[in-house]
Image (spheres, grey):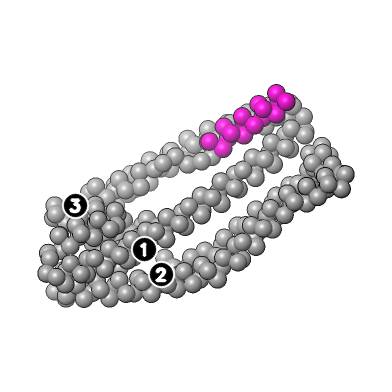
Amino acid sequence: MRPAIAASGLVLVALLLILPTRGRGLHRLAATSPGLVDRRRKLSVGGADLTRSAGRRLGSLTFAAAISVIFLGSLGLQVLVTVAAVGVIVTVVFRQRAKHRRRSAAAVRRAQVIEACDVLSADLTAGRPPAEALDGAATICADLQVVSAACRLGGDVPATLELIAETPGAEGLRALAAAWRVADESGAPFAAITDRLADSLRADEAIRRQTAASLAGARATARLLAVLPFFGTALGYALGADPLTFLTTTPPGAAVLTSGLALSITGLTWTDHLAKDPTP
C-alpha cells in the first residue's frame, strides 16, 4: 500500500505543476492612452515575460515527470500503468471542468455586457454625460470600472474597451468601442447607437443559446461514452473476471488501456471542437 500512496502523491504533484497559476489578465488596462506604440511595446514585454514563465514551468514539469517515471518504474509495471492511467483520467476531468467553468463565466459576462449597454443607453437618453453613464454601467458590468476610470481621467476609452474585449465573453465591448469612436468623431447620437448595439448583442446571444441547446445532446453523449469503460470494468468484475489486473499487468492489457484512453480523449476533444463557439 505504501508504494501506491507514494505514487498517488507524485501524481498530485504533477497535476499541481500542470495547473496554470492565476495570471494578471488586466494589468495592461492600467495605462490610459500614451499611444498605440507604447501599448504595443508593453504588450510585447508582457508576452516575453509570459514566454519565460511558460518555459520555466515546462522545465519544472519535465523534471518532475522524469523523476516520477523513474520512481514508478522501480515499483513495477502495474504501479506505473495504474498511476499513469489515473493521472490521465484526473487531468481530463480537470480540463473538462475548467472548460465548463470558462463557458459559464463567458455567458455571465456576455449577459452583463448586454445589460450594461442597456443602462448606458438609458442614461445617455436621459441626458447624462458619458462619464456618468459609464459609472452607472460599471455597476452592472465590473469590466467597465476600468473604462469608467479611464474616461474620468481623460484616457482613450475606445482603446481600453478593445483591451477588455480580449476577455472571453466581453467581445461585445469591441463593438461598443467602435460605437464610441464613431460618436466621438462624427457627432452621431451615442444613445441611439448604444441602444441598437444592445439589441444586436441580445439577438446574437439568443442565437448562441439556441446553438448551445442544440449541441447539449452531443456533449452529453460524448461524456456518456467517455465514462462507459468504467461501467464495463464494473460489469467484468460482476461476471467474475479481473479486468484491472489484465489491463495493468500485461503488455496487451496496457496497449488496450492506452488505446481506450486515447480514443476517449480524442472523442471529447473532437466534440469540444465541433461544439466550439464560432463567433469571435
Where residue 205 is drawn, which disc sits there? 2
What secondary structure is the magenta-colored segment mainly? helix
The residue singled out by tag 1 in the image is 111
Image quadrant containing the N terminus: top right
Q: Quadrant of residue 90?
A: top right
Q: Is residue 274 left or right of residue 103?
A: right
Between marks 3 and 2, how big is the CA–CA gap?
28 Å
The answer to if 15 sits in the magenta stretch is yes
Helix, strand or loop status at disc 1:
helix
The range drawn in magenta is 1-17
Q: State the image coordinates of residue 73 (x, y, percent, origin top left).
A: 73, 30
Label 1 neighbour load within 10 Å: few <14, some 14-19, many 20+? some
Residue 237, horizontal then vertical, whole percent: 82, 44
Decide if residue 154 is on the left or right side of residue 206.
left
The local crowd at label 3, few if under 14, some if 14 to 19, many if 20 or more residues have their Cα within 10 Å, is some
**In the rendering, which numbered label is found on residue 149?**
3
Residue at 83% in and 47% down: 238
Image position of 161 with respect to 38: above or below: below
